[in-house]
Amino acid sequence: MKIRIKGNSVRMRLSRTEVEQFGKEGYLEESTAFGNGTFIYALEKSKEGTELRADMAGQKIIMYVPDSIATEWTNTDMVGCSNNMSLANGEQVFLLLEKDFKCIDAGVTEDQSDNYENPLTSCD
C-alpha cells in the first residue's frame, strides 16, 4: 500500500494482492519506521457513512471505507473513489483510494508485478 500526502490531500494506492486482502479482511495496515517513532497508515471497512472518511490518532492515519463502496471496489473494475471530507475548522481534506496501475514511464525500478495493468498501454 502506498500513501501520498500533499497539503490537505491523502491518496492511498493498493496492489492486486492488497485489494484482495482488504476485501477479505476489511483491514490493511503499513508502517514506516523513523528514528523516534513509527508512522502508520491503514485502510478499514466501516459500517457507518456513505463516503470515504479519515482520522488521525497519534502517528496513525486510518481511512475508512463504507462497506458498500469497499464491496464494489474490491469486486469490480472500479478504479477508485474519493471524497472531500469537511473538517471541524471549516477546511476540507481530499481523500482518494485507488488501485495501483503499472507505470508506463520508462526507467521505473520498483517491482510492479502485482499492480493492475495500466489501461493507457496497449498490446499489438
Image: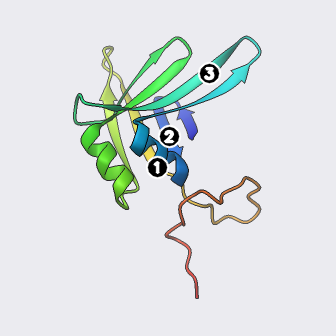
User: Which image quadrant is residue 44 in?
Assistant: top left
Q: Which mark is residue 72?
A: none
Mark 2 — residue? 12
Q: Which mark is residue 39?
A: 3
Q: Quadrant of the N terminus?
A: top right
Question: Pointers 2 and 3 in contact (CB under 8 A)?
Answer: no
Badge 3 element:
strand
119 shown above or below 67:
below
At label 2, counting other C-alpha atoms closer than 10 Å, the crowd grade (few under 14, some 14-19, many 20 or more) is many
N-term mark: 2 or 1 = 2
17 shown above or below 117:
above
N-term mark: 3 or 1 = 1
Q: Which mark is residue 20?
A: 1
Query: From where the camera sits, is residue 15 visible?
Result: no
Is 25 or 85 nearer to us in this picture? 25
Residue 10, given in percent of the width and then of the height, sits at 48, 34
Q: Nearer the viewer, mark 2 or mark 1?
A: 1
Distance CA(mark 2)–CA(mark 1): 15 Å
Give amino acid for label 2. Answer: Met
Q: Residue furthest front?
A: 24
How many numbered discs sit on the rendered protein?
3
Give amino acid for label 3. Answer: Phe
Residue 78, given in percent of the width and then of the height, sits at 36, 57
Q: Name the residue at 62% across, 21% down.
A: 39
At label 1, counting other C-alpha atoms closer than 10 Å, the crowd grade (few under 14, some 14-19, many 20 or more) is some
- 106 sits to left or right of 51: right
At label 3, counting other C-alpha atoms closer than 10 Å, the crowd grade (few under 14, some 14-19, many 20 or more) is some
Is 106 or 25 nearer to us in this picture? 25
102 shown above or below 45:
below
Query: From where the camera sits, is residue 72 visible?
Result: yes
Give amino acid for label 1. Answer: Glu
